[in-house]
Image (cartoon, rainbow, N blue to C red):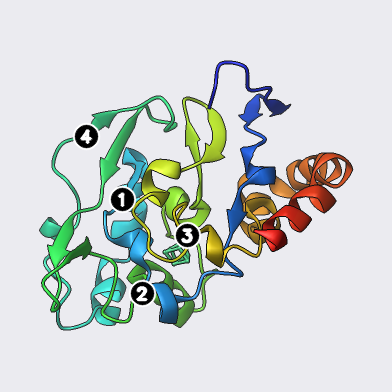
């Protein structure tokens, strides 16, 4: 984000127009990327941890033989002060060393799936019912109250990352319809979509295809 960036605003949320111009892959495909974005864990609001822990036993039931079933190993012990979270504090998920000798979020299974999402689906809930907001949103994030793109994280990714524009076929805005509706609601999505169609859609779809 530069100082001159002109943000859009929707109900007090600032939106960085980079979401309209940056490219993304045709869709998340765990068989290609292995869910690599989940290898560093995630921060969530401190008050979301008890929401997840309500389903402790059901989560353990869907974990594989390599994931830690001891729930005292699931979350970091120290809270981080962070005003981007409603309570003012964030808590991180812990990492573990998987069967291939690399680290990943405790909730990522050997197939690359999120155990929080698998648990929800297997128990008839919405797939994102207990999934941390920043996992749902990625590659979009909120930094200092601005909805933008998480390029720090993206630098490290071998399929959808910013170093792999050869894999890009669409803009992040086009790729993330369901997620943006989840974050901003239908009204927020429609507001952004109007702006996108008017100012960006054709131009950037063509540029991404040429690159
Ligand atoms: S964001 Fe990237 S690394 Fe994560 S699941 Fe999607 S394609 Fe894979």
Report x, y in % for residue 121: 48, 77
Q: CA distance from mark 3 to mark 1?
A: 37 Å
Q: CA distance from mark 4 to mark 1?
A: 14 Å
Left or right, 152 with reference to 69? right
Left or right, 86 with reference to 73? right
Choose the circle earlier in sequence order: 3 or 2: 2
Q: Can you name the residue that lies furthest to the right here?
A: 198
| Dot in front, 2 or 1 | 2
Q: CA distance from mark 4 to mark 3?
A: 34 Å
The quarter of the picture where the C terminus appears is bottom right
Report x, y in % for residue 4: 62, 17
Residue 50 is labelled as 1
- Determine which residue is flagged by label 3: 164
| Dot in front, 4 or 3 | 3
Label 4 close to label 2 by CB (< 8 Å):
no
- Determine which residue is flagged by label 4: 79
Report x, y in % for residue 61: 26, 80
Q: CA distance from mark 4 to mark 2?
A: 29 Å
- Determine which residue is flagged by label 2: 34
> Alpha-carbon neighbours of circle 4 within 10 Å: few (<14), some, or many (≥20)?
some
Near-viewer residue (197 or 121): 197
The local secondary structure at tag 3 comes to loop
């Amino acid at each position: 984000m530069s100082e001159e960036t002109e943000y859009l605003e929707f109900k007090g949320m600032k939106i960085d127009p980079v979401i309209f111009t940056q490219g993304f892959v045709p869709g998340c495909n765990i068989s290609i990327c292995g869910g690599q974005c989940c290898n560093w864990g995630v921060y969530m609001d401190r008050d979301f941890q008890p929401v997840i822990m309500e389903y402790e036993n059901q989560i353990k039931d869907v974990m594989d033989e390599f994931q830690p079933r001891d729930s005292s190993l699931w979350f970091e012990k120290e809270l981080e002060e962070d005003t981007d979270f409603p309570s003012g504090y964030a808590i991180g998920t812990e990492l573990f060393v998987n069967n291939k000798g690399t680290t990943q979020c405790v909730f990522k299974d050997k197939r690359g799936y999120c155990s929080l999402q698998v648990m929800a689906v297997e128990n008839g809930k919405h797939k994102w019912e207990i999934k941390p907001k920043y996992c749902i949103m990625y590659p979009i994030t909120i930094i200092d109250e601005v909805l933008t793109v998480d390029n720090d994280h993206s630098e490290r990714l071998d399929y959808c990352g910013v170093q792999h524009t050869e894999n890009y076929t669409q803009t992040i805005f086009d790729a993330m319809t369901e997620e943006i509706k989840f974050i901003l609601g239908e009204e927020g999505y429609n507001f952004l979509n109007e702006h996108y169609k008017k100012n960006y859609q054709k131009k950037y779809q063509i540029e991404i295809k040429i690159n």
